[in-house]
Amino acid sequence: MLSDVDLKKKAVGEKAVEDIQDGMTIGLGSGSTVYWMLKRLGEKVQEGIKVSGVPSSVRTENWAKEFGVPLTDFSEVNRLDLAIDGADEIDPNFNLIKGGGGSLLREKIVNQAADRFVVVADESKLVEELGAFPLPIEVVQFGWELTAKHLESLGCNPELRKKDGDVFVTNNQNYILDCQFNSITEPEKLHEEIKSLVGVVETGLFFNMTNQVLIGEEQGVKVLS
Ligand code: 5RP
């Protein structure tokens, strides 16, 4: 049986598919909310809709294959009609923290290539200010300890991400440093500061990108735009 949160994720993931039109090329985000979007999209494909998707993680690629969603990549397309992705935090200006699943780099490449970017999330992801969720930062493996020290000087406490006791390695063979900032008042400025550090590949701060947010609530799906 699905938990209350999973029911909200399912409702919002399925709702996002209503935006998908025949012939579209779609950016396929990552995470458990996107899972439900992919499952429903697979059903629409079975019903006859013609679409193709660019996956933002190996996990998403595997789910898309399982559900029969046709895939493509950036060797074949350079713009996407629509991208649909989850988020870990969403502020009132649609600034996001992403990367809880470790796919932030590919997600940013995919979402930035889309004419329209829609975020799907349950209501727990809405915040007044970003920063309670530790900011995921993708860094190269070499010298990560030094990169962590430099990040520390920006006012956070970087933790090397681990999974099942092992260091977590991204789909791009990098590490993730989860950085607790508590309060991020200027996401764009912080992103620029972090990006200027050698060893940083990308941050989980997403801004000036989101066109619409779909929120799964007790009462149904709320549309914010
Ligand atoms: C992965 C992400 C996910 O979109 C984010 O963590 C939300 O995941 P979920 O839908 O499982 O709550 O950014 O890198």
Image (cartoon, rainbow, N blue to C red):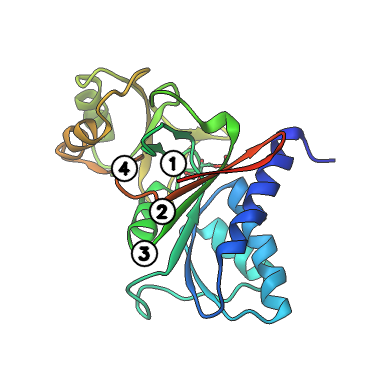
Indicate whether 48 appears above or below 88.
Answer: below
The answer to whether the residue bearing label 2 lies less than 8 angstroms from the nearest atom of ligand 1 is yes
Report which residue position mark 4 lands on.
207
Question: Which comes before the other along the chain, label 3 or label 2?
Answer: 2
Mark 3 nearby-residue class (10 Å; few <14, some 14–19, many ≥20): some
Quadrant placement of the N terminus: top right
Residue 55 horizontal side relative to residue 123, left or right? left
The residue lying toward the viewer, choosing from 144 and 15, is: 15
**Which amino acid type is shown beneath numbered disc 3?**
Asp
Camera-nearest label, 3 or 2 = 3
The residue lying toward the viewer, choosing from 141 and 210, is: 210
Q: CA distance from mark 1 to mark 2?
A: 8 Å
Report which residue position mark 2 lands on.
107
Q: Mark 3–mark 2 contact, CB under 8 Å?
A: no
The label shown at residue 115 is 3
Question: Which comes before the other along the chain, label 3 or label 1?
Answer: 1
Question: Which comes before the other along the chain, label 4 or label 1?
Answer: 1
**Which amino acid type is shown beneath numbered disc 4?**
Phe
Question: Which comes before the other along the chain, label 3 or label 4?
Answer: 3
Q: CA distance from mark 4 to mark 1?
A: 14 Å
SS for tag 4? Answer: loop
SS for tag 1? Answer: loop
SS for tag 2? Answer: helix
**Which amino acid type is shown beneath numbered disc 2?**
Glu
Report which residue position mark 1 lands on.
99
Q: Position of residue 117 (x, y in %)?
A: 42, 56
Mark 4 nearby-residue class (10 Å; few <14, some 14–19, many ≥20): some
| Occupied quadrant, residue 3 | top right
Q: Position of residue 190 (x, y in %)?
A: 22, 30
Question: Which comes before the other along the chain, label 1 or label 2?
Answer: 1
